[in-house]
Amino acid sequence: MAGITTKTVHDIFQSMEQGPASTSSSTTAQAWLDHHSRSLGFFIGGKFARPADRQSRRLADCKGDAVCSTACAEEGDVSLCASSAADGYKAWSSLTCSQRAKVLLRLVGVLGLHGQCVSELCELCEASCSPSSLVRLLQFYSSWAQLRDTLIPDWTPLGVVVIVTSDDCSLYSLMLKVLPALAMGNSVIVVPGGSSAPPVLLLAQLFTSAGLPAGAFNVLTGSDVTLGAKVAQNPRISYVTYSGSKEDGVMLCKASAGMGVPVSVSTCTGAMCPFIIFESADIDSAVDEVMEAAFKKRKEVHWVLCVQESVSDRVVARLRLHMAGMKCVALRGDADRALLDAAVLEAQQQGATLVQSCAAPPSGAQYPPTVLCGAAPSSPYVVAPAPGPLLPLLTFRSNSEAVALGNHSPHGHTASIWTEDLTLALETAKSLSVGTVCVNSNWVCDPCLPVSGHKDSGSCTDGGREGLYQFLRPPCSSSPLHRCSPVSMDYSQFGTEASPAIIPDTSDPTSSPPSYSQFVGGKACKSVSGCSVAVQPPGGSGVLAFCPDGGRKDVRNAVEAAIKVQPGWMKKSLSERAQSIYSLAKGLEAKRRDVAASITSQTGGSADEADREVELSVARLNVWAAYCDKVQGGSLPIPQSGSALSFPEALGVVGFVLPDKNPLLSMVTLLGAAIATGNAVIMVPSQKHPLPAVAFIQVLQSSDLPAGLVNIITGSRDQLTVALATHSVIKAIWYWGSAEGCQYLQYTCTSPLKTLRLFSQDGMDWTQSHPSLLEDMWRNAVQWKSVWIPTA
């Protein structure tokens, strides 16, 4: 035809021109948006709803052009959506596992028909997720829907689950929570960020058309993440889980504090992740991948390049070669450009040198790909990088120094290791405090990989079999928190009231009533304050004994002792851990008469009841000793060439604020779960019944547990809760106490982020020995790490 120039394949490959754009590009996505007049409402009860009087939020593409607008939900919309989700839960959970699996598998065919529309809409809204990755998610979780009652018997769905994401969260991260929640039989209310709202609304429509019951998948949109807290306040909500940036996650935790609903956080965006290149690496491949990760892919995380000194010059030379001719990268706005200019100026003032693809324009929301060579690990632009194409480069000499650099960041999301030495790769992977390690590769996303947020990167596990348990309730769990409205609290004043009956600790040890000690760093000792608190007998009159009134300094000393011993305890063989716990059980058996007497005097129960509690406590420790080496990770069936491994790791230092009920049995049950999995513990005994715990100190003193692994601090529950919550090293807190204490912890334990398990005082039957009780505790005492090792 006239006007058409014919080019050979050879000519095209020589010039590397892009082919002509299809005239039908984005037509299906645009048609879907036009069908909704580019004004999207909510998806409630299996259909779209767009109230006319709602405020709207404008969504623009990378060029600033309007894509569509989304409605902002109000109180009435939240109530209607929660009611619809409750009805959807009844219909969805009443189906058999096989029926739910068939519905999820049917969605694979629906995505095949509408995959182009989903893909175009994701690209238009910059919500990265390919239809093939969605198909993989559906296939994986449809299988788990089929096998739930077979492989996870007796566990039941939670009910209505709220899934909240921030604006910068990918659609894949969102669906990594939606699909397992549905597969386990829950209904979901999704509160998406701005960029992922249109694709989620489209998927909700497609899921319902495939046979998902009306109300099982609902979508509410709003102006910011606080809408998630408004939804959580509804009494029909059972659980709230979040993915996205740390700032929005903190806002959600604080806004939902005191509502009596558990909240988990996965800060999958904005983390600083190490990209480590050893001298034994394939340098060309490593540089190719770091260029792709740092400058070409839409980034959810920031990377810091760590290079061994012996090959740093080669790496920098390869970077210069790859960056030559690269164009400037578009930023989100002038504000990001200002932050980027300030970071680069600060880096130059600190002695860093720049490697840039071209000169930075004098102004505008664009910036060239930039490598900052000679960066210092503590520099602000390394710890908290500015948004944009900025890659700090650090150097190291030894393997241990590489691990130290990799663990310097407060985040613990993912890491990439490059070396041809498999032993070095595995040793480094074990030592890094991150949830995912990729060896000689960049980022592998597959639902079979369990990913836990280490350090400040989250308080839950997503993916794999392990990620299913956050959406299930064991048959013999403690009763959930009572649903309530947040109380007005001055958080700075919580726990500052003086303990009752505090007196100077000048009592004569031979006089009555006796004066007990607490246990810190392997030694029985008095409180730093030098004061004691009177323990009253069951009748409430008189003084039964005096216990130390512990405080912040006692907690600080206990944590210092714990962090010294916990890494060594975690590295002990599982059989050595088991033998130590068996020895602890034998020691308790030897002291059973004294411990039983303390239970009787404290609780007022009969001698037979006290003896029975000691007997159950000995048996519980024996069970935990046997449990040590029985439940572990292993190889994962990832559908790619290579090997994937997952294994549980200790959380670190864990704080327990113990219940009043069964003071000895509850303590040894939690203690066994913590130390069997490699943790160190700080235990706050019941303020009402502390004597069984202080009697147990004699057992600890005669055991072979390392000094500092177990610490027992008596005193005011609220005062010690504040000390645990504000200590930056403590990773997790399990709390039995007041509604005010639960609200304080949810509001406070956000910086750094702590894993919380909050319970009311009543509800738990500690005497039961159902396997699900121990499994639930074991799973909450570990965090998971996945290692991906590709092959050719």
Image (cartoon, rainbow, N blue to C red):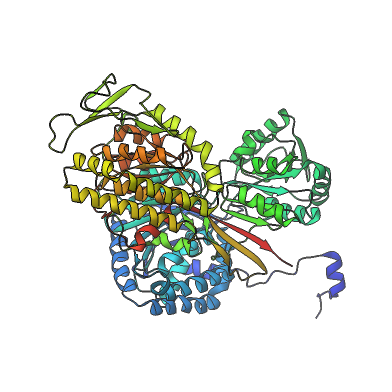
At a point 37% along the width and 58% down the height, the residue shown is: 774
Q: Kindly tell me whether residue 529 is visible in this rendering.
A: yes
**Residue lying farthest front?**
590
Along the viewing direction, whichever of 359 and 583 lies nearer the viewer: 583
The percent coordinates of residue 280 (x first, y second) are: 79, 52
Looking at the image, how many numbered discs can be counted on the residues? 0
Residue situated in front as seen by the camera: 335 or 111: 111
> Toward which corner of the image does residue 395 lie, by quadrant?
top right
Q: Which residue is depicted at the point 54% across and 66% down?
A: 448
Residue 775: x and y, percent?
40, 60
Q: Is residue 708 left or right of residue 426?
A: left
Q: Residue at x 82, y 46 (%)?
A: 320
- The quarter of the picture where the C terminus appears is bottom right
Is the N terminus in the top left, top right, bottom left or bottom right quadrant?
Answer: bottom right
Q: Residue 460 at what x, y percent from top left?
A: 46, 53
**Image coords of residue 477 (percent x, y):** 31, 58
- Compared to residue 540, the image places residue 44 above or below, namely below
Horizontally, residue 349 falls left or right of residue 783, namely right
Please name whichever residue, 654 or 759, is drawn nearer the observer in this view of the structure.
654
Looking at the picture, tell me which residue is in the foreground, 703 or 652.
703
Q: Hey, which quadrant is residue 504 in on the image? A: top left
- With 193 as the anchor, is 409 left or right in this view? right
Residue 259 appears in view: no
